[in-house]
Image: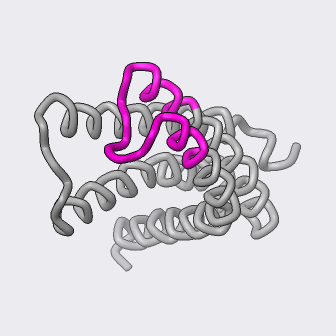
């Protein structure tokens, strides 16, 4: 049985969807309920950093789970395969979140509703080309983090 036969993709999709929905809910509450405005660079940077930080968690789970089950890193080819498949899954999750936000009436200020749909489509298409190598980087980084924790635990 190959290493990629384990349910890593199913678990990744579950974790990614949970974190994406959580981030969307928090951002929605901050903007629409609390009324926080992200006009300043510091607040926008904090928002972006927090969102990226939350989205890295599924990769950390994957790396730890994979090391526990397989005893090693995924091969380069496997990591690229995971990156491609997971990017497609992430794009579907992002599209669903965008549709849900639009359905509840959230709008981007200054942009017409029909332009928002086009903007989301363009962002998803462009994001897919960027997301595959970024996801590959996240996988590499997550494995490096797991290996560093293992070295510290052994006292090295």
Q: Which residue is drawn at the image coordinates 62% and 50% (left, top)?
A: 124
**Is most of the magenta stretch helix, strand or loop?**
helix
Residue 52: x and y in percent read 39, 57
Residue bounds of the magenta highlight: 96-120
Q: Quadrant of the C terminus?
A: bottom left
Q: Residue furthest top?
A: 104
Q: Which residue is drawn at the image coordinates 45% and 31% (left, top)?
A: 18
Residue 115: x and y in percent read 53, 43
Asked if residue 126 lies left or right of residue 85, the reply is: left
Is 49 included in the stretch rendered in magenta?
no
Is 100 included in the stretch rendered in magenta?
yes
Up/down of 140 relative to 113, above or below: below
Q: Which residue is drawn at the image coordinates 42% and 45% (left, top)?
A: 111
Can you tell which quarter of the image residue 30 is in? top left
Residue 83: x and y in percent read 69, 57
Can you tell which quarter of the image residue 151 is in? bottom left
Residue 89: x and y in percent read 67, 40
Viewer-closest of 142 and 120: 120
Up/down of 51 relative to 16, above or below: below
Q: Residue furthest right?
A: 1
Asked if residue 50 lies left or right of residue 127, the reply is: left
Q: Which residue is drawn at the image coordinates 78% and 49% (left, top)?
A: 3
Up/down of 62 relative to 24, above or below: below
Asked if residue 107 lies left or right of residue 63, the reply is: left
Viewer-closest of 113 and 100: 113
Q: Quadrant of the N terminus?
A: top right
């Amino acid at each position: 049985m190959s290493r990629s036969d384990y349910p890593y993709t199913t678990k990744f999709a579950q974790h990614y969807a949970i974190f994406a929905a959580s981030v969307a809910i928090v951002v929605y509450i901050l903007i629409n309920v609390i009324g926080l405005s992200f006009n300043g660079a510091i607040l926008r940077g904090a928002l972006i950093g927090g969102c990226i930080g939350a989205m890295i968690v599924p990769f950390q789970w994957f790396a730890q789970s994979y090391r526990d089950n397989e005893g090693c890193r995924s091969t380069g080819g496997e990591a690229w395969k995971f990156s491609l498949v997971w990017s497609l899954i992430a794009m579907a999750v992002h599209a669903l979140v965008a549709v849900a936000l639009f359905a509840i009436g959230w709008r981007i200020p200054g942009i017409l509703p029909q332009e928002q749909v086009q903007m989301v489509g363009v962002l998803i298409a462009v994001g897919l080309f960027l997301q595959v190598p970024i996801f590959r980087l996240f996988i590499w980084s997550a494995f490096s983090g797991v290996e560093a924790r293992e070295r510290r635990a052994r006292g090295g």
